[in-house]
Image (cartoon, rainbow, N blue to C red):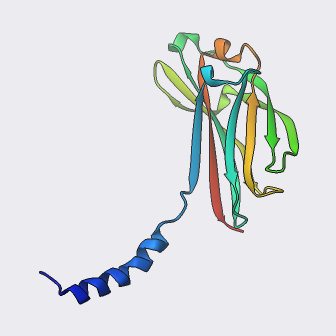
Amino acid sequence: MRFPIKTGRLIAMALLPLLVLSCDRPESDESYLKASHRDDQGKYCFTLKMDDPQYLYDVDVYISSSADRRHYLPFSEDVLVEWTAPSGAKFEETVSFSSETEVQKTFFSKVYLYHYRAELVPVEYGDWALSLKFPSDFEENNHANGIGIRLIRNGSR
């Protein structure tokens, strides 16, 4: 069925607002760094876009590792977490991650997920730098391939 040109334009104009409204920001962003992509100080460095005051933010950290099942050992590691605000202000804390939070495994790999922060309200809005520094022998001892970050935007405040 063919529409006359005017009718086609009217339909396009009617659908345009619906298309614009459906172009919303994704609910979450993820970033993953291989162990070989740490910086000179051995830190995994990420940028988190927390620029919208209408959201609360959750931050998850996941660790992927690979070894056959016989070589997995329980672990508990203190990790230095450093936040840098858009203005340059720095905050840091030490957090303990353990192997008790395994979420996926095969014979040759495991993924551990940590719900690091929930319903976070940033003191400044914009791009935040987040770095994680694991103990120097963490990757080797735990067969870690890399670290990932998931930033989840939760409903409106």
Q: Quadrant of residue 38?
A: top right
Q: Quadrant of residue 9?
A: bottom left
Residue sitting at x 81%, y 36%? 82
Residue 136: x %, y % from top left = 75, 15
- The relative height of residue 7 versus residue 91 in the rendered view (above or below) is below
Quarter of the picture containing the N terminus is bottom left
Residue sitting at x 25%, y 83%? 8
Q: Is residue 61 left or right of residue 120?
A: left
Q: How many marks?
A: 0
Residue 50: x %, y % from top left = 70, 54
Q: Quadrant of residue 137?
A: top right
Q: Nearer the viewer, residue 69 or 122?
A: 122
Q: Nearer the viewer, residue 109 or 49?
A: 49
Q: Residue furthest left?
A: 1
Residue sitting at x 64%, y 48%? 151
Q: Nearer the viewer, residue 46 or 137?
A: 46
- The relative height of residue 1 versus residue 93 in the rendered view (above or below) is below
Quarter of the picture containing the C terminus is bottom right
Q: Nearer the viewer, residue 124 or 135?
A: 124
Residue 110: x %, y % from top left = 54, 25
Residue sitting at x 58%, y 34%? 32
